Image: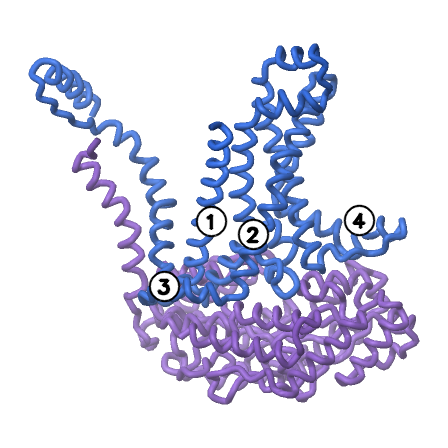
Chain colours: A purple, B blue
Amino acid sequence: MRMPRRALAAAVVALALPLSACGSGGDEGGSADASGKVEGDITFQTWNLRANFKPYFEGLIADFEKKYPGTKVKWVDQPAEGYADKISADAAGGTLPDVVNVSPDLVAPLAKAGLALDLDKSAAKYKKEYLPGAWASHEIPGMEGTYAFPWYLNTGPLFYNKSLFKEAGLDASKPPKTYDELFDNALELADKSDGKVATLANVPTIEDFGRYGVELMNKEGTAFAFNDAKGVELLTKYKELYDAKALDSQALTATPESSGKKFLTGAVAMNPGSALDLGNFKKQAPNLYKNIGITDQITSTGKVNMYVMGVMVNAQTKRTPAAVAFAHFVTDAQNQMSFAKKVAIFPSTAGSLDDPYFTKEDGTDETRVRIAAAKSLKNAVNYTPVLFSEQMKTELRNSVAKALQGKVSPEEALDNAVKACDRLLKQQG
Amino acid sequence: MASSSSTAAPGTASHGAGTGRVRRQLPTSPWLFAAPGLLVVGIFILYPFVSTLVNAFTDRRTLIPGEFVGLANFRELLHDEMFWIGLRNSTLYVLGVVPALVLLPLLLALLVQKNIPGIAFFRSAFYTPVVASIVVVGLIWVWLLDERGLVNSLLETIGVGRVGFLSDQWLLLLSAMAVTVWKGLGYYMIIYLAALANVPRELHEAASVDGAGAFRRFLTVTVPAVRSTMVLVGALSSVAAFKVFSEVYLMAGPDGGPAGEDTTLVMLVQRTGTGLTGRVGYASAISVVVFVVTVALMLLVLRADRKEDA
């Protein structure tokens, strides 16, 4: 039985259509020149912010459209889950919004694919408005330029459960300040509770290695280096904790959410968090809230870890002046400050952290945490290398897990992790 | 469009009968009717399939088109420890889940087949897990099997002590298998109920008269009568088991359990090929392997059935 020629042609066209659609995406570059008139329609994408901050963003957009008549901003918000996948799909399909909320690790592959605008070229005049460390957080090793405006920063203290400390005979008013003290306290807590109370709930991440003082990458940013003696020392300590049940037995499969839950239920004595968590404790675990202890992040480098959010401009936007102006508007000192007053985040603009809101005590725990965090942010570091992809995080977690289970030595585990991460780095191109 | 087919068909027939010159022409209308379906199949099944096949021979990444690399991805698979772990776990899943899903729903169907008052409630109850969202089901089981969950509290009360259902790699895989079986029972039970309804009552009665007990009747009457349904269930469940993702992902976490030891092949495809730095080419190569094994599994089950028929 033969297919009529017309039907065959229709089938070929039907199949070829999606192929050609794929081929044409992404090669029509926009202009890098942001000096023209600010006008036209642009799209702005945020990362899970609509549910809690809808009025804030609607006001922000209205202010921008009023300041620049002839502009129109369409706001889209994506859920937290699968955000990177959504950006990948848009980037691959040539439908990436003009202005996108990103984190440094998301910017790196987009910049390498030529999809993020180099702000050192297109928006250099704004550089001085931001904290130098924050501006540098969207630089990509091996590339010239900065690929996103820094937006809000976050860091937080280490929370601990005072009653669990007391039950183990520890002085709850003297929480650990150094890694040695932390490990000693953890072993004692596990010993006194017969292994029922762990102090930590998570295996060490790349950020933990950074805070411990491990050199994470070589200076050129071309290879990982966290398998040095210091890295092995940290992992050996964690192995000791795991064996003594001072590191939770489910730590190998833990997520930040699951460890947060363990802290809430009193199964774990310490957990990192942010000022946001205090409200959560008050609501969900009033008993824990009464016994909550707050201490500084433990670090061997003198610098705490911070998380950076950024706002990227799509290099292929047809409205470069409007997109750059809007990305700057969202992240300028005034708008970051008003956003910070709505939620426990910290502005990345120079001088904002000296505002009385971040320096004056009012006697509440929330303010105490906020002031301490703002102070520590002035010399904080985003330890996670921008080139450290999700796949690399998995490689590290799996290698660390093998060392903790005793299947390989800490040294071998880190050697394997570095080898795997280097291979992935090369494949990233 | 209707007129072209109605005029062409009788014309063709008369030519064939009268002159012997067979001029066969397919009418266009059936193709037009089938076009929407074909288009959907073409775009959502055929195109992704061909695209995956092509990508498997390239080093394509999410944002970088990549180049043809021949069999390099498949060679890399051979030396990838995680691939072998995935293959092992997916195979174990088939071996663990399929026998249970072939047998248990049949027994369940026999139980609820009888027309006694209130049986509809049990039929619906057994079917409930099928309609429940796998995410909700997964989370409920995680809560139940957690170290401080209900199951461990009960085990501790009776003196067994806590069991690391979610921290031991083998117990984790076993727990995920249990969830798959529990969730699939109702679905396959319905298929068996349909098959059992076609088993003639006289056969059972004759076997009873001959002195066969319930167990013997099950083996000599019920099983042969529903054998082809058992093969169908075996084929369907083995394909589904080999491609397992949700249960293991939800219970073992995105990393695939401690040190990734519970990773299945489809989880590996997801982990390797998604995200901004995803290795689409390599993930496609794993997908091709999954496809080949799935087809092989189907053929194996169907062939075993044919052999028994012969």
| Residue B154 makes an appearance in the image | yes
Q: Mark 1 Cα within 10 Å, few/some/many (few <14, many 20+)?
A: some
Whole-angstrom CA distance, mark 1 to mark 3, is 18 Å
* Chain assignment, label 3: B
Q: Quadrant of residue B19?
A: top left
Whole-angstrom CA distance, mark 4 to mark 2, is 26 Å
Q: Secondary structure at mark 3?
A: loop
Residue, x 76% and y 67% (percent of image)?
A248
Residue on which disc 2 sits? B90
Q: Are marks 1 and 3 on the same chain?
A: yes
Numbered label tally: 4
- The circle drawn on residue B293 is 1
Residue, x 65% and y 78% (percent of image)?
A208
* Chain assignment, label 4: B
Q: Is residue A137 shown left or right of residue A184?
A: left
Residue on which disc 4 sits? B151
Residue on which disc 3 sits? B71
Measured along the vertical axis of the image, is residue A115 above or below residue B286?
A: below
Closer mark to the observer between disc 4 and disc 2: 2
Q: Mark 2 Cα within 10 Å, few/some/many (few <14, many 20+)?
A: many
Q: Position of residue A389 (x, y in %)?
A: 51, 71
Q: Amino acid at mark 2?
A: Ser
Q: Are marks 4 and 2 on the same chain?
A: yes
Q: Earlier in the sequence, mark 4 or mark 1?
A: 4
Q: Are marks 4 and 3 on the same chain?
A: yes
Q: Are marks 3 and 2 on the same chain?
A: yes
* Chain assignment, label 2: B
Q: Amino acid at mark 1?
A: Val
